[in-house]
Image (cartoon, rainbow, N blue to C red):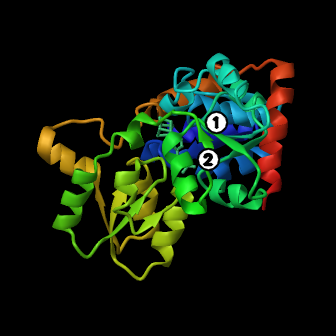
Amino acid sequence: MKDRILQLKKEKNAIILAHYYTRPEVQEIADFVGDSLALSQKAAETDADIILFAGVHFMAETAKILNPTKKVLIPDMSASCSLADSCPDEEFAEFLKQYPDHTVLSYINCSARVKALSDIIVTSGNALRIVKSLPEDEKIVFAPDWNLGSYINRMTGREMVLWEGACHVHDQIQAEDVEQLHKFHPSALVIAHPECPEHVLKLADFVGSTAAMLKFVATSEKQEFVVVTENGILYELRKQNPDKKFYALSDMHEAKAGDCECANCKYMKYNTLENILSALETETPELILDEALMEAARRPIERMLEFK
Ligand code: 13P
Ligand code: SF4
């Protein structure tokens, strides 16, 4: 299957972009694996004719918005994102009516319609930097992730108005589980994603996006890490750092409660070698977006990409 995918990719001048949360075998056949920021940067610069996005729906939408004339394939159209789904565009538009003089910052994990209602898009890789770059007296609405927004408020002393959305994977992580895992491995550093709630982030030695965590581990002299984010990152962490040890929440949960969804984004796992091969063979499912919607959603994404 892998050989056939690689062959089709070549024949059709297709590029496979994959998020770090996808299955290891998917990451292996991808041309580029990254976090949300790196993937949107890569999507903006590709000269491939077809972009196959092994991630979730809003990521493929972003790639399409940045490449309106290219064919964007998504192996499973139902690969959504609970965080993006926690911010329906009509309700968000109503909410924004209360804040007409606010700049609207939206985390990239949102629908194209929500992007179109926003002034600047951010990812966990650049959100803090972008917020800090705005004048201190600028009023801001931040959506959809309440945990990330309140983390930024704590780090900057701002009082951004927050939409109350959350990622079901990160929001469900329990501080007690992190503490217990850390107790088993007391010399490990705790690394966490800012989509986690405050009581979890308080326990972290390092908070950052997926790519920032990878960089932190690669440059750290420490040998052991408790990983507080989605499990998919473990594949790249172990690949890049074969001599270091990583402890995942899911290992502890498996020991405690059998099979569980802890720290596992089921939507990312919808991408399989089977449906990637089928998407390349049939060039479906193709993501189609309305031209006017793409136009409206493009500017806030481009404003993000302009931040270096
Ligand atoms: P990053 O890729 O920005 O780390 O975000 C994680 C995530 O949840 C992607 O959906
Ligand atoms: Fe969305 Fe959470 Fe999955 Fe990321 S981990 S894609 S935020 S549901």
| Nearer-the-camera pick, 284 or 129 | 129
Vertical comparison of 279 with 185: above or below:
above
Label 1, residues with CA under 10 Å away: few <14, some 14-19, many ≥20 = many
Tell me, yes or no, if residue 164 can be seen here.
Answer: yes
Report whether 154 appears left or right of 38.
left
Is the CB atom of the residue marked by disc 2 within 8 angstroms of ligand 1's nearest atom?
yes
Q: Quadrant of residue 202?
A: bottom left
Label 2, residues with CA under 10 Å away: few <14, some 14-19, many ≥20 = many
Q: Secondary structure at mark 1?
A: helix
Residue positioned 69% across, 55% down in the render: 131
Q: Which of pointers 1 and 2 lies earlier in the amino acid sequence?
A: 2
Check whether the beta carbons of the residues at disc 1 and disc 2 lie within 8 A of each other: yes
Which residue is farthest left? 256
Give the position of the C terminus as an image quadrant: bottom right
Residue under pointer 2: 36
Please give the label number shown on residue 59. 1
Counting from the top left corner in percent of width and height, residue 306 is at 83, 54
Report whether 229 appears left or right of 179.
right
Q: CA distance from mark 1 to mark 2?
A: 7 Å
Counting from the top left corner in percent of width and height, residue 174 is at 28, 47
Residue positioned 66% across, 56% down in the render: 126
Counting from the top left corner in percent of width and height, residue 242 is at 38, 70
**Amino acid type, mark 1:** Met
Counting from the top left corner in percent of width and height, residue 123 is at 63, 48
Is the CB atom of the residue marked by disc 1 within 8 angstroms of ligand 1's nearest atom?
yes
Tell me, yes or no, if residue 48 can be seen here.
Answer: no
Vertical comparison of 188 with 108: above or below:
below
**Amino acid type, mark 2:** Ser
Residue positioned 68% across, 61% down in the render: 129
Report whether 188 appears left or right of 206.
left
Q: Secondary structure at mark 2?
A: helix
Vertical comparison of 188 with 285: above or below:
below
